[in-house]
Amino acid sequence: MRKQIVAGNWKMNKTFSEAEILITEIADALDEADLKNAEVVLCPPALYLEMTTDVAFESNFKVGAQNIYPEDSGAFTGEISPLMLKELNVSYCIVGHSERRKYFNESHEFLKRKVDSLLKNNISPIFCCGEVLPEREANRHFDVVKNQLEESLFHLPEEEFMKIVVAYEPVWAIGTGVTASKEQAQEMHSFIRGLISSKYDTTTADETTILYGGSCNGKNAAELFSQPDVDGGLIGGASLKAEEFLQIATSF
Ligand code: PEP
């Protein structure tokens, strides 16, 4: 049975003291929440990872980073390595978010290196894929997502691929308030599972968690998560409010 996950991507939001309050609010709410089998993951800015893992140690959530540089150490001023995260008990790291692809020009090849260096340090990549609006309008969205997976993930042997979480995030839905319909999400998730099945096998495909991301909120999460191939969400804006985030996390 594959994992259901709700991961909050805080992006570059919250001051230290605001983050402390939000983490505590979420941890307290999780103590009372009925998550069924779902796992909650918080991905705060790197500066707050240690504080977050400290709280997570006593609570019911896992911690993810938003980014790494794909080397264990070295002369890479300003960067953070997966080896550093490993010692902090960080379990996940977002890779291939559309904001990093767009603003930091991250290539398929660079994302592949990030995936490899995370896996080497036992951290599961949450690998984001998804098309921009003109690509969907030109009916190229399946090809775009296929290419993203092939170029940065499909070099992995099966036992390593099993540690990947895929997040389908149509770029036109991220931070826009426009959510993919449940049919659009299901169609792409089923396509992704089919690709994994063709590349590896049906067991690997059935065991892979595929999240939806893009303006997912307390109102639409239950409908999206009810789709057979949608195993949870990667949540941006709505993960910054404890009550709404908890509503999403309990939407299965
Ligand atoms: C995201 O950035 O991964 C995301 C899904 O953002 P939002 O939920 O705000 O659309």
Image (cartoon, rainbow, N blue to C red):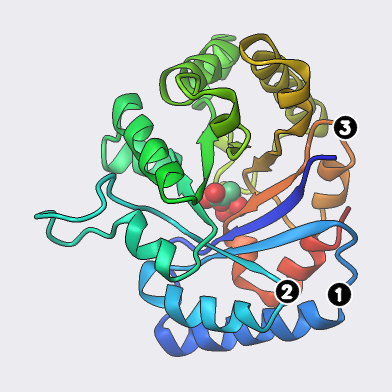
Judged left or right of residue 148, residue 227 is right
The residue indicated by pointer 2 is 60
Q: CA distance from mark 1 to mark 3?
A: 23 Å
* Mark 2 secondary-structure assignment: loop
Judge the density around disc 1: few (<14), some (14-19), many (≥20) Cα neighbours within 10 Å: some
Kindly identify the amino acid type of the residue bearing the numbered disc 1.
Ala
Sequence order check: which comes first, mark 3 or mark 2? 2
The residue indicated by pointer 1 is 33
Q: CA distance from mark 3 to mark 2?
A: 25 Å
Residue 112, quarter of the rendered image: top left
Q: Is 27 rendered above or below residue 99?
A: below
Residue 103, quarter of the rendered image: top left
* Mark 1 secondary-structure assignment: loop
Looking at the rendering, in which quadrant would you find the N terminus? top right
Give residue 124's position: percent from left, percent from top. Answer: 53, 47
Of the pair 241 and 121, the residue shown nearer to us:
121
Whether residue 99 appears in this view of the structure is yes
In the rendered structure, find residue 228 and report the number of the disc placed on it.
Answer: 3
Q: Are marks 2 and 1 in contact (CB under 8 Å)?
A: yes
Q: Residue at x 76, y 21 (%)?
A: 190
In the rendered structure, find residue 93 and report the number of the disc placed on it.
Answer: none
Kindly identify the amino acid type of the residue bearing the numbered disc 2.
Asn
Q: Residue at x 27, y 49 (%)?
A: 69
Of the pair 161 and 15, the residue shown nearer to us:
161
Question: Residue pushed farthest left?
Answer: 75
Judge the density around disc 3: few (<14), some (14-19), many (≥20) Cα neighbours within 10 Å: few
Residue 78, quarter of the rendered image: bottom left
Give residue 104's position: percent from left, percent from top. Answer: 26, 42
Whether residue 12 appears in this view of the structure is no
Q: Is 153 rendered above or below residue 75?
A: above
Kindly identify the amino acid type of the residue bearing the numbered disc 3.
Pro
